[in-house]
Image (cartoon, rainbow, N blue to C red):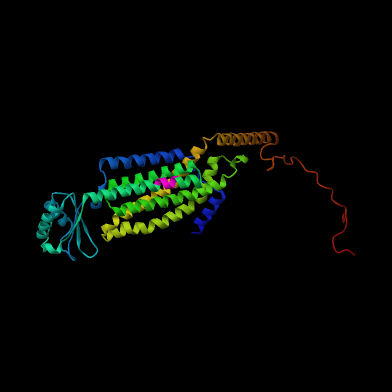
Amino acid sequence: MSKLGNLGARLHRGEISYDFVGKRRIWYGVSILITITAIVGLAVRGLNMGIEFQGGAVFTTPTKMSTSVAQAEEYANTASGHQAVVQKLGNGSLRIQIAGIDTGQSDKIKQELAKDLNLDPEKLAADLVGPSWGEQIANKAWEGLAIFMVLVVIYLAIAFEWRMAIAALVALIHDITITTGIYALVGFEVTPGTVIGLLTILGYSLYDTVVVFDSLKEQTKDITKQTRFTYSEIANRSINGTLVRSINTTVVALLPVAGLLFIGGGFLGAGTLNDISLSLFVGLAAGAYSSIFIATPLVADLKEREPAMRALTKRVLAKRAQAGADDDVAEARYGGDEADDDGAPAVVGPRHQPASRGRGRGRTSGKRR
């Protein structure tokens, strides 16, 4: 841990750094490849929308059922003619979801399920979700997401500048696309919990991005009055200065979410946790990636197009070229390594030593008398 802290301090001071901005084309390519994969997954497989969005019926059995999940799925598929989703709850009961059926069909399916499961029909609880209600939930989710995006852009444009607002918006769309694409590829059910998870990870992604933007805004104040660094170089320093902090917060956030996803949903079989835990896990990882590799390099790209930043880059490069030419002249004139750090020639050749004093010369050894 002390080594990690020392690394973070050195990154913050600029003693060491990694060229994130200089290699931005690589990160853009990786993100485009992942995004295309996610879009293809959405187009080919589609999202497995939950019953809350499609409408249908949910049947819940009493506790301590001896019927397995696979067997209950077979019973439900046969009784309804639709693809059923069966989950085993923590108390041992089964939750059977069948989408796309109406009230008349649900009564018939309930009777057949109770017969197959050796249950009294009265003990098999049934809840109906109308398709109009599910459509309202979906519309409200999209409306909430759109309002969130608009407010984010307005706030960042006021607090920072419009280029940072655009970069943050691109990063958010990047995170949403990847997360929904993973849902399509994995086949997890999309529920209201999934929507809550998406909104949560968008806020977390913005947090990491704003931290870097705040550092960048502070370091680029009066940037045109100096000729040491270009805007892209200062942007890279901002990323490196907050890198360890971003990694720490992401890892700390991912650990409990990984517990929900892999332990709760995997080992313990609590399938109801999968909808929100997967969106949180994928979204947190994608948000940390986009804040470092997408948002800030994109801001640097947009800023470098400004005439003032172009002029600054020319002055910085010209100054470095002049400094390099001066060093070459000094090396050629004074033999390279024999010049001191200030460019002044070092003393070459034999040095004249001061004449030794005659004090004590010819005196015999021993104590003075």
Q: Can residue 62 be seen in the rendering of this structure? A: yes
Q: Position of residue 284 (x, y in %)?
A: 39, 52
In terms of image quadrants, where is residue 95?
Answer: bottom left
In this rendering, the count of numbered labels is: 0
Residue 294 on image: x %, y %: 44, 43
Q: Nearer the viewer, residue 361 or 148?
A: 148
Q: Which image quadrant: the C terminus?
A: bottom right
Task: Please give the range of residues in magenta.
Answer: 149-153
Front-lying residue, 153 or 43: 153
Q: Is residue 231 left or right of residue 278?
A: right
Whether residue 18 is situated above or below residue 61 in the rendered picture: above
Please provide percent x and percent y for residue 49: 25, 49
Q: Residue 201's spot in the image, x, y percent?
A: 38, 52
Q: Please state if 368 lies on the left or on the right of 303 as rendered.
A: right
Name the residue nearer the viewer: 233 or 337.
233
- What secondary structure prevails in the magenta region? helix
